[in-house]
Image (cartoon, rainbow, N blue to C red):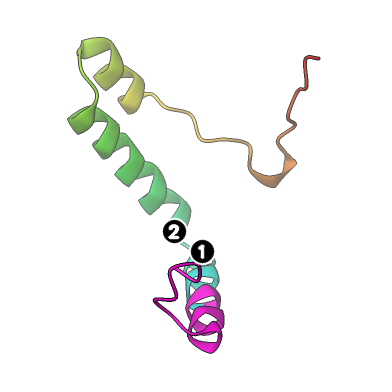
């Protein structure tokens, strides 16, 4: 949004802080998980994808390791 200049820098700083605060709400991880599973079930084709959405396992969070196979 900043690139498109749809927001001032001050407005973006405030909005970013608001979004970060939302992530601290106790139910936020479950809401995100439920919403993601519902989106996958609705938008992905085939039973296998819907099944995967129901059984999706959340990422390990900030301690996740990214493997670089160079």
Q: Position of residue 23 (x, y in %)?
A: 51, 63
Q: Nearer the viewer, residue 38 or 43?
A: 43
| Above or below: residue 14 compared with residue 50 | below
Q: The N terminus is located in which quarter? A: bottom left
Left or right relative to 16: residue 49: left
Mark 2 vs mark 1: which is more N-terminal? 1
Q: Quadrant of residue 10?
A: bottom right
Which residue is located at x 25 percent, y 21 percent?
50
Residue at mark 1: 23
Find numbered disc 1 in the image and state the secondary structure of the residue it sits on. loop
Q: Position of residue 26 (x, y in %)?
A: 48, 63
Q: Quadrant of residue 34?
A: top left
Q: Nearer the viewer, residue 2 or 51?
A: 2
- The segment highlighted magenta reads 1-17
| Above or below: residue 64 compared with residue 8 | above
Left or right relative to 3: residue 69: right
Find numbered disc 2 in the image and state the secondary structure of the residue it sits on. helix
Tag shown at residue 28? 2
């Amino acid at each position: 949004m900043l690139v498109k200049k749809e927001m001032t820098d001050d407005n973006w700083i405030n909005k970013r802080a608001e979004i970060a605060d939302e992530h601290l709400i106790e139910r936020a991880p479950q809401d995100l998980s439920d919403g993601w599973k519902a989106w996958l079930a609705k938008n992905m084709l085939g039973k296998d994808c819907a099944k995967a959405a129901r059984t999706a396992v959340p990422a390990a969070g900030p301690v996740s390791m990214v493997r670089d196979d160079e």
